[in-house]
């Protein structure tokens, strides 16, 4: 199973992995590919700048520093956002859904709105 971490799961994995179920941590450890989107880095940087998230340099380290794969936003991802129903208004999450659909990834998320999409989900 190839995984895409939602931003909150990426934060939990970096700062408080005890918030993630052991079987999901195991899936993350054994998956051939665990992706973190550049969208997540953008979301974290914005939240830190707005004071909604404490600055922590670990969160802006390249994903490879934690054995994760960076998933850059591609043209096909942006186009896919346009065909998604508006189950979710958050543009960051809509782009993550689009990336997961295009790349055939399972999103690791606790967000109930993402679960409304036709996309594979793994609940942390």
Image (spheres, rainbow, N blue to C red):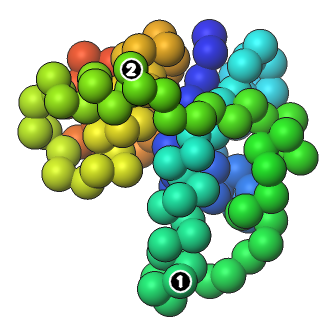
Residue 118 image position (x, y, % from top left): 25, 17
| 98 horizontally vs 117: left or right | right
* Relative depth, front residue between 57 and 110: 57
> Quick check: 27 above or below 24?
above
| 62 horizontally vs 102: left or right | right
Residue highlighted by disc 1: 49
Mark 2 and mark 1: Cα distance apart in space: 29 Å
> Quick check: 8 above or below 49?
above
Residue highlighted by disc 2: 76
* Relative depth, front residue between 110 and 36: 36
Q: In the picture, residue 76 is in which quadrant?
A: top left
Q: Residue furthest front?
A: 75
| 79 horizontally vs 27: left or right | left
Q: In the picture, residue 109 is in which quadrant?
A: top left
Residue 119 image position (x, y, % from top left): 33, 19
Quarter of the N terminus within the rendering: top right
Q: Nearer the viewer, mark 2 or mark 1?
A: 2
- Tell me if mark 1 has few (under 14), some (14-19) or many (20+) residues whose alpha carbon lies within 10 angstroms of its own: few
The residue at the point 79 percent across, 72 percent down is 57
* Relative depth, front residue between 57 and 11: 57
Residue 120 image position (x, y, % from top left): 40, 17
> Quick check: 41 above or below 29?
below
Q: Residue furthest bottom?
A: 51
Disc 1 on helix, strand or loop?
Answer: helix
């Amino acid at each position: 199973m190839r995984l895409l971490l939602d931003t909150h799961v990426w934060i939990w994995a970096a700062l408080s992995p005890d918030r993630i179920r052991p079987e999901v941590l195991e899936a993350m450890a054994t998956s051939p590919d665990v992706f973190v989107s550049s969208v997540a880095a953008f979301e974290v940087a914005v939240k830190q700048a707005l004071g909604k998230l404490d600055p922590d340099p670990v969160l802006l380290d390249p994903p490879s520093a934690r054995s994760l794969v960076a998933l850059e936003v591609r043209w096909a991802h942006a186009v896919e956002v346009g065909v998604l129903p508006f189950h979710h208004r958050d543009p960051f999450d809509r782009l993550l859904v689009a990336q997961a659909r295009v790349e055939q990834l399972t999103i690791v998320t606790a967000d109930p709105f993402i679960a409304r999409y036709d996309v594979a989900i793994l609940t942390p």
